Image (cartoon, rainbow, N blue to C red):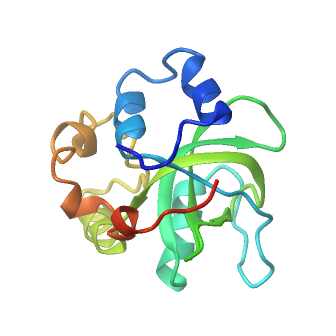
Amino acid sequence: MSDIPEDEEVARLFGRGTIHSVVDPFLRRYGRRYLPQDLPTKYAGGKFGVCYANSYRLASEHAVTYVEGYAISTRTASPHLHAWCVDEKGLVLDPTWRSGTFYFGIPFRLEFLKKAIAERTERGDCYYGWLDDWRPGWPLINELGEQPELWLEPSYFSRKFET
């Protein structure tokens, strides 16, 4: 379970009803809130619409953590499944939107991502998202969900970010 309090924004996010019947319970269990900021200029932005690839690239090139979850952009009030990165302080680095208003997600081990993406690439599947990986039946949630030591970023257990 997340170690952050369910503040008003988080409560509103999940209080809208189920956004995604498979993803929501898993995200509530392992997710946490991250503090938004504009993308610092030292990081390159990516193409709009490919947040998973953009965030994976950023995590692979810099000492930052890849995260997936719900985010709300500055253009809309609706939550979207999205990927971004966070720095060592828990500040959002969003190479796709550059900035958003709300981020709640799960941090992933880079080693897990590299191995899983290599396996997908061998099969000819280049989709990068993990939470809504519906094609093979949500393997992260249904097969690996009870083994967070395999995929969950270890800093999740030790860091407490201010919200």
Decide: is 5 above or below 163. Answer: above
Name which residue lies at 31% across and 57% down. 124
- Name the spot of residue 3 as percent of width and height, x first: 43, 50
Residue 12 place in picture, x, y as percent: 64, 25
Of the pair 42 and 14, the residue shown nearer to us: 14
Q: Quadrant of residue 78?
A: top right
Residue 38 locus on image (x, y percent): 80, 64
Q: As drawn, is 64 to the left or to the right of 145?
A: right
Left or right, residue 147 beside residue 59: left
Residue at the spot x=67%, y=62% of the render? Answer: 94
Residue at the spot 39% in from the left edge and 32% down from the top edge: 23
Report the residue at 20% width, 62% height from top: 149
Residue 90 vertical position relative to residue 102 in the rendered view, above or below? below
Task: In the displayed orientation, state which residue is furthest to the top.
Answer: 17
Q: How many marks?
A: 0
Q: Residue 74: x and y, percent? A: 83, 44
Question: In the rendered image, is residue 19 in sight?
Answer: yes
